[in-house]
């Protein structure tokens, strides 16, 4: 069967209103165009090679990070052009940091560093019990003054949302204000989106897609390693890479 050409269809404003009605004003979806949809399709396709997966994941990550940075505060400034003219512009406000949730969140660190060269990046490791899916924090390391910073929290997949909810609870224990957190995500299920906006209504969320099927193979395919619990010999995910 031959391919059918698809013209770019921007999201109607009514669809964006639907998202706001369901999830509130602080959850935003990366504007969908054919390029974004193609990246999502490649990442969901089981036949995508690992090298292609990493390449196209990095492209989607870059788009999500750029849009997440757009949620941070900017201040007005005036610069002088080479011809001596004044230009009224914007400048990015300092006082931000990144926090990645190990391990899939680490895939998003390079995209952030490509935009913000020397940004501080903290880490949280949350492990989920293979049977109960209960999430517990194993490790956390943040900049000392994290409570005074805006925090770009990075994790690509939200299935139940439990991992991210646990990580946010740790940030709040370190006195980070909910309204200072921007959650940067690639794929989110409707259940996770609802849980997150209900638990943390002041937090901003930026995702590329809300869909009931979570591509839970992300970390395994991006890094090329299955996950093992130390001391156990079974692959806790039981999935192929
Ligand atoms: O929203 P949740 O239900 O908490 O799930 C979020 C992600 O965590 C799990 O991945 P995995 O344990 O392999 O994480 P990793 O790749 O980051 O190690 C799960 O397969 C999802 O991809």
Image: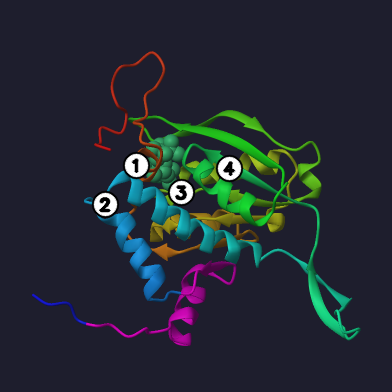
| The CB of the residue at mark 3 lies under 8 Å from ligand 1 | yes
> Could one spot residue 163 in this view of the protein?
yes
Q: Residues within 10 Å of mark 4 (few under 14, many from 20)?
A: many
Q: Identify the magenta region.
A: 5-31
Q: Which residue lies furthest to the front in this view?
A: 83
Query: Label 3 to label 2, Cα distance in Å?
Result: 25 Å
Look at discs 2 and 4 and give the one toward the viewer: 2
Picture layout, residue 8 above or below residue 126? below
> Could one spot residue 213 in this view of the protein?
no
Look at discs 1 and 4 and give the one toward the viewer: 1
Q: Mark 3 points at which residue?
A: 161
Q: How crowded is mark 2: few (under 14 residues within 10 Å), some or many (20 or more)?
A: some
Residue displayed at 66% across by 47% down? 98
Residue 48 - label: 2
- Residue 19 covered by magenta stretch: yes
Mark 3 or mark 2, earlier in chain = 2
Query: Label 1 to label 2, Cα distance in Å?
Result: 10 Å
State yes or no: discs 3 and 4 in contact (Cβ < 8 Å). Answer: no
| The CB of the residue at mark 2 lies under 8 Å from ligand 1 | no
Q: Which element type, helix, strand or loop, lies under badge 3? A: loop
> Considering the image in quadrants, where does the C terminus appear?
top left
Mark 1 or mark 4, earlier in chain = 4
* 223 left or right, relative to 140: left
Q: How far across and how far down the image is residue 177, in percent?
A: 73, 51
């Amino acid at each position: 069967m031959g391919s059918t050409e698809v013209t770019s269809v921007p999201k109607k404003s009514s669809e964006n209103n639907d998202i706001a009605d369901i999830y509130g004003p602080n959850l935003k979806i990366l504007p969908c165009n054919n390029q974004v949809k193609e990246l999502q399709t490649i990442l969901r396709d089981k036949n995508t090679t690992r090298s292609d997966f990493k390449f196209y994941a990095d492209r989607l990550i870059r788009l999500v990070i750029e849009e997440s940075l757009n949620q941070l505060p900017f201040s007005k400034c005036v610069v002088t052009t080479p011809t001596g003219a004044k230009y009224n512009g914007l400048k990015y406000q300092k006082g931000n940091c990144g926090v990645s949730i190990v391990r899939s969140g680490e895939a998003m660190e390079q995209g952030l560093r490509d935009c913000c060269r020397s940004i501080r990046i903290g880490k949280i490791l949350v492990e989920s019990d293979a049977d109960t899916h209960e999430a517990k924090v194993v490790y956390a390391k943040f900049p000392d003054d994290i409570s005074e910073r805006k925090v770009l929290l990075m994790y690509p997949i939200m299935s139940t949302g439990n991992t991210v909810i646990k990580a946010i609870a740790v940030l709040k224990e370190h006195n980070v204000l909910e309204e200072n957190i921007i959650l940067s995500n690639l794929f989110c299920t409707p259940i996770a989106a609802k849980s997150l906006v209900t638990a943390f209504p002041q937090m901003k969320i930026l995702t590329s897609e809300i869909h009931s099927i979570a591509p839970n193979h992300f970390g395994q395919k991006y890094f090329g390693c299955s996950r093992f619990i130390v001391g156990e010999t079974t692959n806790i995910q039981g999935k192929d890479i």
